[in-house]
Image (tube, grey):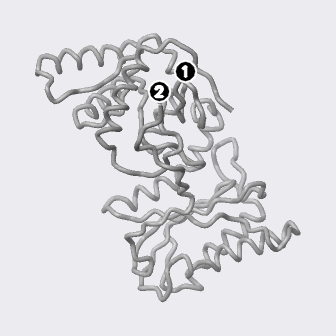
Amino acid sequence: MESSFRKPLMHRTTRRANFHDYTKPWIYMLTYTERPNRPPLSILNPDASITHTELGNLIEKELRDIPLHHPEMAIYDYIIMPDHIHFILHVKEKLEKPLGREICGFSGACTNHYRSLFNVEAKDSLFFPFHDRLLTGKNQLATMKSYIASNPRRLHIKRLRPDLFRRYNHLKIGDKEFAAYGNIFLLRNFDRQSVVIHRADSEKIRIENERRWLDCVSNGGVLISPFISRDEKAIRDKAIELGGSLIILRNEGFEERFKPQGREFELCTEGRLLLLAPWPDNLHRASVTRAQALEMNALAASLSAFSGNISLVN
């Protein structure tokens, strides 16, 4: 039976912040992703370095020339990956038109190089519309630069261990279907325990539960939870410090180009993480409602005791 709060499929490939004025001075990280069946922009080498293709070299020149066409803009950093590019763009002065309209000439020039090199039809564009992230905090610029610099290493690791970075659109566990990302073999770990902390729990119960959960991960077991409350997040963090494995339930599914970030990426490289979304088609980021929290806690409890069939649904 489907939940009453299940939301329709919402794609976020061209996500924009509807609260933001895209003509004002700001710093962005922009991502342009190639459309399917386009030639590579770069090659990932065995040492996790990147070598640009001829098309990639032309795109790099267009990227570096953006400030020549738009003196009110600066490029702080960039990376040209095999099928996408990231760059940090600083809009230093108020724009006459929204950012997307101001820099549409960049993607158009890249498409023209693609058409010229490969003699393709004029209707075939190279990139999807760009995706943007707004700089919102004091230290976020350093985080953006670190993310860009680590892209080749991340791709190298994912190619070495593709099984630990696999997205499953339809994973059937018993009679319920999930979307999943990560190490699905954690579902076969014989010691799986759900983590839920109730407000009414006494201090004694909390201490006993914490000891039991941390003993579980210390001995190779897996903790399952949406880890919503502050106290549950504290258990999650202690489990990670102990080298434990986690199955995390989330109210949001996985868009086509989903990639785990930061700590979740590192946990995936070690095979210590599985993300499960009980509402696969919900790609809308929103706060977890009480109804969702209760249902995910119930699912965590049932998954901890589950011993039935796990299968992929076409």
Query: Eyeballing the image, is 239 above or below 89?
Result: above
- Between 152 and 293, the one lying in front of the other is 293
Picture coordinates of residue 240, whole percent (x, y): 36, 28
- Which residue is drawn at the image coordinates 34% and 23% (left, top)? 242
Query: Eyeballing the image, is 101 above or below 111?
Result: below
- Which residue is drawn at the image coordinates 55% and 55% (left, top)? 11
- Between 60 and 95, the one lying in front of the other is 95
Farthest residue toward the bottom? 96
Picture coordinates of residue 86, whole percent (x, y): 56, 61
- Between 206 and 272, the one lying in front of the other is 206
Farthest residue toward the right? 119
> Which label lies toward us, 2 or 1?
1
* Disc 1 residue type (three-letter): Phe
* Disc 2 residue type (three-letter): Arg
Q: Which residue is mark 2?
A: 272
- Which residue is drawn at the image coordinates 11% and 21% (left, top)? 202
Query: Eyeballing the image, is 22 above or below 273?
Result: below
Q: Which residue is mark 1?
A: 185
